[in-house]
Image (cartoon, helix red, strand yellow):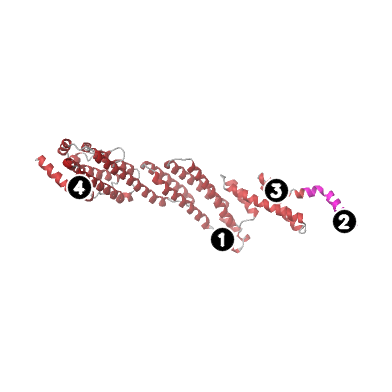
Amino acid sequence: TEGLMQQGKNNRTLMQNHSSVVDLLEIPSLMDTCVRNGNYDEALDLEVFASKLATVNSESRVAKMLHREAVDIKQNMMTTLLEKLKSSIQLPECLRVVGYLRRLGSYSEVTLRLKFLACREAWLQEEIAKIDMEGFGAYDFLKKLTDAHRVHLFDIVMQYRAIFADDANAHDAETYSKGDQHALQSDGGVLYSWGSHRVSCYLDLLRHNLPRLTQGNDLASVLEHSMYCGMSLGRVGMDFRELVAPIFITAAESLFANGLQLAVETFQLALAKHDWDPLLASAAAATSGPEKYKDSQSGTSPPQELLQYYPLAVFIGAPSRSILSALNELRHCAFTSCTETCSGLLTSTLNVASSALAKAHKTSGKNASSVGNCALVYAELAVPYVQTCLGRIFPDNSPLIDSAHALQPLNVILSKAKRTMSKMQS
């Protein structure tokens, strides 16, 4: 009987406080609604209330259940806030989000800094992926990539410095454990390490994509863009211009080497198809010589005598796939430190061309004299002209083509051709 009376009393008490009990049971759903609608202040207040309720009513299973559900929703709220940091948000919103994360109390100050940078890193990677997925060519991709790093890296660093001001954090250092306080005092390396990581990622992308450029003016334009980006980021201590130069030097040398390779392939193909005309060759030999080239040294146009030998004309001065076109691409990005490498590449290319001429002479049979005259024009007009063009690109460094090495495969042929010419002139 007493049990029934107590149960009845409890029921009456429950009925009298029905509305209050319903309100308490709705705390989790109300908190979830607040989180979904972005009312984080109210959600945090509800979580604090549920925690106090569980503390005061430690024996109540309902109070403990409400607290557990509130903690779960608090965890969802933290995930939502971190996702916001992975989106395109400005400084005021960043301050608000980090403020809520601090109130949640799930992270120490140092861990919060790392989380912030990790989230902003994820967003930046997303932006870079979008650029890559739009299918731009190498030139447009590199320019947009550089612009994205210039704008977004600057914004992220400024957001970090505004949110995690060292003076404010030093004032609050006493609230952290001894280990966290030590980490906080040495936190100057967090932003520096992240900035170094991002610069390294950008440089890696440059190394991977610069070889895709096929024009020197595009390479020079991307270099200008990168230098401006480095200068701009220098305002936040991330000037990487000295690290960029070696990458572009390598790209310029590679671009020049590819151009020379195309010129050699074109020359070899032209030699294989060329029909050597002995009469034309004799006329060309009679009108060519070192003095002819001296008359045209003041200009940059190829010697006219090269037109009498189609393989030499396309090898030296064709609009594309020639030595002149390769030099034209190089002049847009002619770094001083490229001088020796480019001179060596050009010497090697001329040597390969000499070998091709020597092979053509060996297999030409009755047209050997025609090929010999072509070799003579090559040695006395084409090679000096190429040397002059290279000197125009590097005027202060006097780059020299090793003519002896470049013409070494033709030594015997040239000696014979010169004797023949002497006899004709006498």
Q: Please state the extent of the stretch shown in magenta in the rendering.
A: 1-22
SS for callout 1: helix
Observer-nearest of 300 and 370: 370
Figure check: 132 above or below 178: above
Q: Nearer the viewer, mark 1 or mark 4?
A: 4
In primary-sequence order, the first of circles 2 and 3 is 2
On the rendered image, what quadrant is the N terminus found in? bottom right
Q: Nearer the viewer, mark 1 or mark 2?
A: 2
Is the Cβ of the residue at disc 1 closer than 8 Å to that at disc 4? Answer: no
On the rendered image, what quadrant is the C terminus found in? top left
In primary-sequence order, the first of circles 3 and 1 is 3
Checking the image for residue 6, the label placed there is 2
Residue visible at 52% across and 54% down?
A: 191
Checking the image for residue 12, the label placed there is none
SS for callout 3: helix
Q: Disc 3 marks which residue?
A: 31
Figure check: 24 above or below 139: below
Distance of mark 2 from mark 3, alpha carbons?
34 Å
In primary-sequence order, the first of circles 1 and 2 is 2
Observer-nearest of 359 and 321: 359
Distance of mark 3 from mark 1, alpha carbons?
34 Å
Distance of mark 1 from mark 4, alpha carbons?
71 Å
Q: Disc 4 marks which residue?
A: 410
